[in-house]
Amino acid sequence: MNVFFHVGRYVAFLVKVFSRPEKHTIWIRQFFKEVQKLGLSSTGIIILVSLFIGAAITIQMAYNITSPLVPDYVISLTTRDTMLLEFSSTIISLVLAGKVGSNVASEIGSMRVNEQIDALEIMGINSSSFLVLPKILAFVFFIPFLVIISMFVGIGGGWLSTVFMNVITPQDYIEGIQLAFIPYYVTYSIIKSLVFAFLIVTISAYQGYYVSGGALEVGKASTKAVVYSIVMVLLFDLILTKLLLS
């Protein structure tokens, strides 16, 4: 019964978020602030994680594919498709669930316990729309850029591993990433990332918006936001993979 209560309140929360938005000038200013806070500030961690994972995937594939019947370019082909299909959308979203999810939940939760949200409501402002809608649109807008950056950096990290660790020749690596490229894989990744971005922000905002108590409860809400966001990202990864690739 508790699950149905939260699902119903979450849906009602979303209806309130997308109804009665504030003036365009206020909304646009908030939107660009959230793009910087949620999107641009995440670029560094995405580049770092993608670089090392791309290199690690290439090295692992090189050590596991030892058959002389399998050409070396298969290693880079596998690295490319792994980055495009799964890592640059799903795994990156899991990383962002920790960074962005905790940020959103703690920010809105702190405003709730400090009674700032109540003050907005008293002034006649739709607090959920004012606080949450710019975050949703900003993160959904920016996450495709993070996914594409992750793809390029991850594949580049694999190439660097061939240069400095000599797992295969750079020429074989380049041949593999050019072979049998399917553009739909990029589209598929971006579609998944848009859904994941929406889930991360809305779930985290929901946890923060309905927190009650003090700083301890805000911390618990942030933890719940990250855990529930990760679970839903994995669930929808399975659903979208079935729908989009079958």
Image (tube, rainbow, N blue to C red):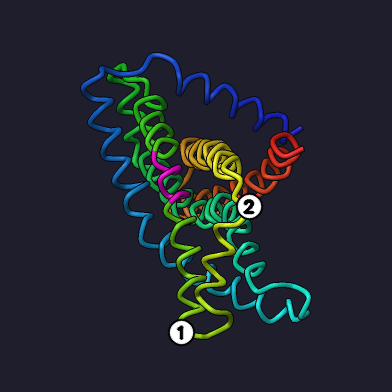
Position of the C terminus by quadrant: top right
Position of the N terminus by quadrant: top right
Measuring 52% from the left and 70% from the top, which residue is drawn there? 158
Side of 45 relative to 192 (left or right): left
Q: Report the span colored magenta.
A: 142-148
Amino acid type of the residue that numbered disc 2 sits on in the rendered structure: Ala
Label 2 sits on residue: 180
Measuring 68% from the left and 82% from the top, which residue is drawn there? 63
Amino acid type of the residue that numbered disc 1 sits on in the rendered structure: Phe
* Image x and y of residue 11, in percent: 60, 24
Side of 18 relative to 89 (left or right): left
Instruction: Kindly indicate the quadrant of the structure image that contains residue 179.
Output: bottom right
Tell me if residue 220 can be seen.
no
Q: Are there few (<14), some (14-19), or many (20+) residues within 10 Å of tag 2?
A: few
- Residue 169 part of the magenta segment: no
Label 1 sits on residue: 164
